[in-house]
Image: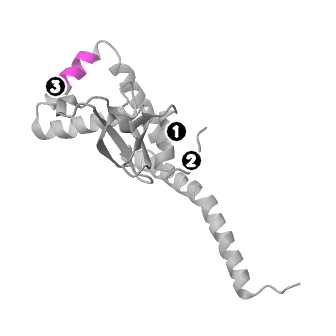
Amino acid sequence: MEQPTFKSISLRLLKYFMNGLLLMSPLAITGYVVYWVITTLDGWLDLSIPGLGLLITLAGITLVGFVGSGLLIGPILSFIEKLLTRAPFIKLIYTSIKDLMEAFVGDKRKFNQPVMVKLSDGTFKPGFLTQEDLSQLGYPGFVAVYLPHSYNFSGNIFVVAAEAVKKVDVNATEYMKFIVSGGVTHFN
């Protein structure tokens, strides 16, 4: 039997270290983010009970959502929104944030139609159909497709010929995870 060398032991230890890093990193980073959110909210609200700030924030957001869903508050929120959309700089910020939030959550989600776009070289790029008709822009027969970047929360919008786009029948959330993970996440 061959005696292990310093190099083989070092490579084995490095392999074990990398495996440990792969196992611990997601746990440690998730734990740190949760800890940071809780301590930040507790600090803002000047609370000494850990986690109470998070609970108060979640309850407050839920309460605002409940009250905002009521018939009495609707006209008030509509009035406030009209005021915000009349101020030039505030309108840009408000409508951009509102559109971004509506794209991911709520009844008006925009990233709900997964597609594959056939590129000129024959490869395919996964994305989401966001507009099915661009005639109003002078591009009849074209669609708007959002192509997210992998390992990043950004992407680009492309105007693509409708025949180059094929709808994909999968869960939109799972599809987004697939794209953002660089294709390593499996569909459930």
Amino acid type, label 2: Thr
Which is more foreground, mark 1 or mark 3? 1
Q: Is residue 112 magenta?
A: no
Q: CA distance from mark 2 to mark 3?
A: 42 Å
Determine which of the numbered discs, if any, sits on residue 82 in the image: 3
Give the residues drawn in magenta, as a range.
74-80
Residue 65 image position (x, y, % from top left): 37, 25
Main SS of the magenta part reads helix
Depth order, front residue of 122/89: 122
User: Do labels 2 and 1 touch, CB within 8 Å?
Assistant: yes
Question: Which residue matches tag 1?
Answer: 174
Give whichever of discs 2 and 3 has the lower sequence position: 3
Name the residue: 42% across, 27% down. Answer: 62
The local secondary structure at tag 2 comes to loop
Which of the 4 quarters of the picture holds residue 104? Answer: top left
Q: CA distance from mark 2 to mark 1?
A: 8 Å
